Amino acid sequence: MKRLPANGLAFLANTIDENFTVSFITYIEFLGYKNLTEASGLFIKLAKVVQINKMVIDACIKLRKTQRIKLPDSIIAATAIVHNYTLISNNESDFINIQGLNLLNLHGL
């Protein structure tokens, strides 16, 4: 995993406390990472996990029809759009062209 630059870490420290939200897909991907550190695992387990619902499914279908995007990424993006969350990712290329998505790359701060 890439380490966040100081500005990205400062943003997290000022924004995320023990109450933050992730998509169930993000939770699975994060904890399924084979080189996950114990500290990172403990951190993500503090998150509220958003489950999929019909609104997210419908938004995901729309994204899949209009964008070249993998299914897990479309679920993550649709979850953020439906719930009006900001998606924090250093993988901007998969999400950059999605209208209505608030995207933030902490590596670029």
Image (tube, rainbow, N blue to C red):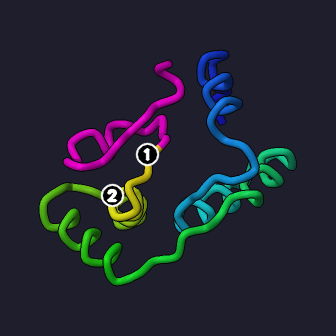
Q: Which of 43 and 34 is in front in this view?
A: 43
The label on residue 62 is none
Q: What stretch is highlighted in magenta?
A: 88-109
Q: Is mark 1 on a helix, strand or loop?
A: strand
- What kind of residue is marked 2? Ile
Please identify the residue farthest to the right as the structure is shown: 38
User: What residue is at 19 percent from the left and 48 percent from the top?
Assistant: 99
Q: Is residue 103 inside the magenta stretch?
A: yes
The label on residue 86 is 1
Relative to 93, is 100 above or below? below
* Residue pointed to by mark 2: 81
User: What residue is at 62 percent from the left and 36 percent from the top?
Assistant: 15
| Quarter of the figure that contains the N terminus | top right
Disc 2 crowd, CA 10 A, few/some/many (<14, 14-19, 20+): many
User: What residue is at 76 percent from the left and 60 percent from the top?
Assistant: 45
- The quarter of the picture where residue 103 lies is top left
